[in-house]
Amino acid sequence: MTKAIDLAGFEAKFRALGDPWDYRTSHFEAVKRAVLIRACGAGKLGRGLEIACAIGETSRALASRCLTLVATDGAPTALATAQALTPPNLRIDYRQAVLPAGVPPGPFDLIVVSEIAYYLSSRDLDRLAERLAGTLAPGGRIVVLHHVVAFDDTAQPPALAQDRLCRRLAARLTGVHARRHGRYAVAVFRRPRAGSRGTGLRRPAG
């Protein structure tokens, strides 16, 4: 089994390849990104947070949906590329952050966590879930999307990481959507507003 990639490994990939996972050119990534954006819900959102934004392809899509957006990554080269690709009219605050301690303070109305959980140890993933749940505003939602098919250089199996993160969030929040899309899965959690009742987990057919 290949050794799990660390922060230095991510930085090396972005330095060497620019877009190591083909976020800008892959049709598969574009479809997956559209699924994620739909899971964020309809209408304009307030303050958003994206964890592990890489070169900012999802960030730029989210920015048109949020009044303000904080996008974090641990690799400086990825953040520099993201900033360079972002038009000045999009209000995105790119920040370097190492997980789980580097989660920015909330509250956030939307938090997006995609393709990062399986690179963290179980202990760090639990801490990340705790921090994310604690920064979500009443009425806000967390969208979690990850590959669930095994591949090299992960710290834990992708399917187990997605499941573990979702279970930890479900202990603090209300699950409202969960669906498998072939090689990846998406789940949505909400923090009910004061006095409201949770809707419970919905699993659409298909």
Image (spheres, rainbow, N blue to C red):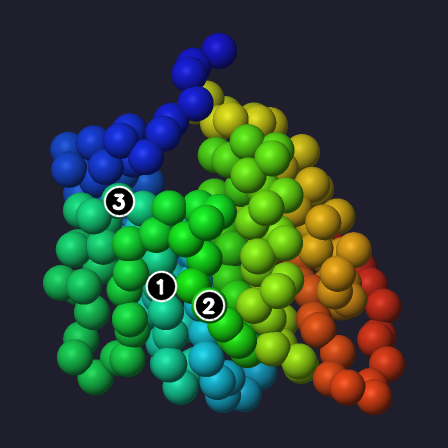
Looking at the image, is mark 2 or mark 1 earlier in the sequence?
A: 1
Under circle 3, the secondary element is loop
Q: Is residue 45 above or below residue 164?
A: below
Q: CA distance from mark 2 to mark 1?
A: 13 Å
Q: Amino acid at mark 2?
A: Pro
Q: Amino acid at mark 1?
A: Ala
Q: Is residue 59 above or below residue 54?
A: below
Query: Dot 1: few (<14), some (14–19), or many (≥20) neighbours within 10 Å?
Result: many
**In the image, what residue occupies the spot 51% across and 26% down?**
155
Q: Nearer the viewer, residue 134 or 19?
A: 134
Question: Where does residue 126 sit, x and y in percent of width and height?
Answer: 63, 43
What is the number of callouts on the image? 3
From the viewer's perspective, tell me whether residue 77 is left or right of residue 9.
left
Q: Are marks 3 and 1 in contact (CB under 8 Å)?
A: no
Looking at the image, is mark 2 or mark 3 earlier in the sequence?
A: 3
Placement of the C terminus among the 4 image quadrants: bottom right
From the viewer's perspective, tell me whether residue 67 is left or right of residue 159.
left
Q: Which residue is labeled 3 in the image?
A: 75
Question: Where does residue 77 sit, x and y in percent of width and height?
Answer: 18, 46
The reply to whether residue 28 is in sight is no
**In the image, what residue occupies the spot 69% across and 65% down?**
189
Q: Is residue 155 above or below residue 191?
A: above
Q: Amino acid at mark 3?
A: Ala
Mark identifier at residue 71 = 1
Q: CA distance from mark 2 to mark 3?
A: 20 Å
In the figure, residue 198 lies in which quadrant?
Answer: bottom right
Mark identifier at residue 105 = 2
**In the image, what residue occupies the spot 50% across and 84% down?**
45
